Amino acid sequence: MSDVPAAAGRAARDTASALDPVTLAVLKGRLEQIADEMDATLFRSAFNPIIAEAHDASHGIYDPGTGDTLIQGKLGLPIFVGAMAFAVKLVIGKLAQSGVAPEDGDVWIFNDPYEGGTHLSDFKLVRPFRYRGDLFCYLASVGHWHDVGGNVPGNYNPSATECYQEGMLIPPVRLFRGGALQQDIVDICLANSRQPKSAYGDLFGQINALDLGVERLTALLDEYGAGTVRRALGELKERAAALMRANIAAVPDGRYSADDWLDNDGIADTPLPIALDIAVSGDRMTLDFSRSADQCAGPVNISRPTAIACCYVALKHVFNDVPANAGCLEPIDFIIPAGSILSAGRPKPVGGYTETILRVIDTVFSALAQAVPDRVNGCAYGTINALSLAGHRRDGSRWVMFSFFGGGHGGHPEGDGLSHGNAPISMATIPPVEILESAYPVMFTRWALRPDSGGPGRHRGGLGAIYELELLEEQADVFLFGERGRYAPPGVLGGDGGATNRFVYQQDDGERSPPMASKMTGISIRRGQRVRIESPGGGGYSPARERSPGAVARDVRLGYVSAGQAREAYGVAVGDSGAVDSAGTDELRAKPAGGAGNRQRG
């Protein structure tokens, strides 16, 4: 049977001037499905629980000329939507410098955080995709590898003063040349990991995900034609930009400011301001971080690409009807001075980037709450509490446990915040206790909600959690990289702040906490000793005295709020049975409302 009619049909579609809405919707779904399948392929094949269980990875389709994000998988981390565009741009720039065109079957690998974004643990693979000889797009994969060298197993080193203490740094190099694997590159990467088998599995999981993307995208272009799909991608980007402009135009013109702080940088015990001024004029918005701290000695710096990427995540939370592609950022301008903590350059350490981007997101929420209070929530718990334990098993083999943990989300216009949720930077899930216990010599003795941790408000912040684990081997070194140990997650519109972060570890003479509140390195524990994280709750929405007594009584009955906090913060007297004491409540409500504002609560 001749393929002339099919070819003629493709040509006719390619020359059409516009796409009908049904075709555009079908192509949007098909393209997103390709990215989703790439995500699922890696999640199901990775050796590392942080990818396989927590889904700390992402895949997407990127513009062949600019590197802009065209399509992003729904299961991966939103923070990578913006960051991976810079990673692809880095490869495009390197190709332009060399004067060499990308070959079919090339794959680039690197983890450079200064131009490609995020931190050294995130390995990026970028593959040019050619269709019938022409460069159609780039496919890219990023995944958080278990260990990439450096001073601290798991790579969250709170005492690092340069990137070389955080892990190996790989610039963009070709992992495949014309489809041929460069084994020496693989050998270098594996030789610099404490967990080479894990790194091997994660690497080839990413390679397989890209192979699947090539297969699926080829089939789609065979069916619809390259021109039709290219127009669909362009139209989706234009629509995202138009929708974001419309959202911004609905925000009252003006200047909105917010200030927040990091506990310290792990080196000097001094708070670091993250300050934002948002200017809205018509359908454009400027985010100005000029008042933020200068780059610091410790590893809470982030690069400019990372800062822009986390602003994208924050704005997507507020304007959640905008499609996830580069069009979102077209109406947004950024002012991030060189030398800022948000635009650090090599070799400033950036390993704790997660803590800083969460604070940036908090400032966006707090600033926009002044302009669009019906679209913004109280701040979430604001730290991933990156915990590493490392030691040797009885047979002498090395084990490294790295995990992150959840906390409360902020109250919002429609209700209370989510308790024990994941960080708002991602779709990453908290690794299941069963997986952690089966993979490492630890036993969790407590995994529970933390009472009184949600910020009081008309809509209460979600509760943080308590995680306590016991060591089952003879000895282990413990490392913690967290935040919000001194500055509570703020509420908005008069809502109270959530509880601050707390970390406790056992020694022979009893329990201790880190001198820097949220960061610790090189502590040794023995068999039977425990470590405990008490994560923050989310900030409240609107004043606590506006919450109904019935809702407060329900919180007390469920153990979310103590009778003491009900009385102090909400002005509600609750009896032992959980019933509201109306006489006591009336008396309390007659007094000035206490507990509003962003208090620090341990």
Image (cartoon, rainbow, N blue to C red):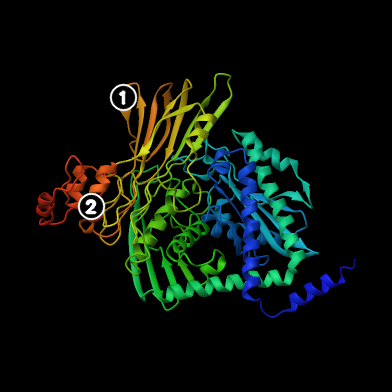
Query: Could you tell which of marks 2 and 1 lies nearer the N-terminus?
Result: 1
Q: In the rendered image, which quarter contains the C terminus? A: top left
Identify the disc placed on residue 571: none
Rendering coords of residue 339 (x, y %): 46, 57
Task: Judge by depth and name the residue closer to the eye, 213 or 166.
Answer: 213
Name the secondary structure under disc 2.
helix
Can residue 580 be seen here? The reply is: yes
Check the image and report above or below for 152 versus 303.
above
Kindly give the residue lying farthest to the bottom in the view shown: 17
- Mark 2 nearby-residue class (10 Å; few <14, some 14–19, many ≥20): some
- Mark 1 nearby-residue class (10 Å; few <14, some 14–19, many ≥20): few
Q: What is the three-letter code of the residue carrying label 2? A: Gly
Discs 2, 1 touching: Cβ within 8 Å: no
Q: Report which residue position mark 1 lands on.
A: 510
Task: Judge by depth and name the residue closer to the eye, 577 or 186.
Answer: 577
Rendering coords of residue 1 (x, y %): 90, 66
Check the image and report above or below for 256 versus 484.
below
Q: How far is the residue under mark 2 from the one under mark 1?
A: 41 Å
Q: Report which residue position mark 2 lands on.
A: 550
Who's the residue at 72% across and 51% down the image?
Answer: 211
Image quadrant where residue 259 sits: bottom left
Name the secondary structure under disc 1.
strand
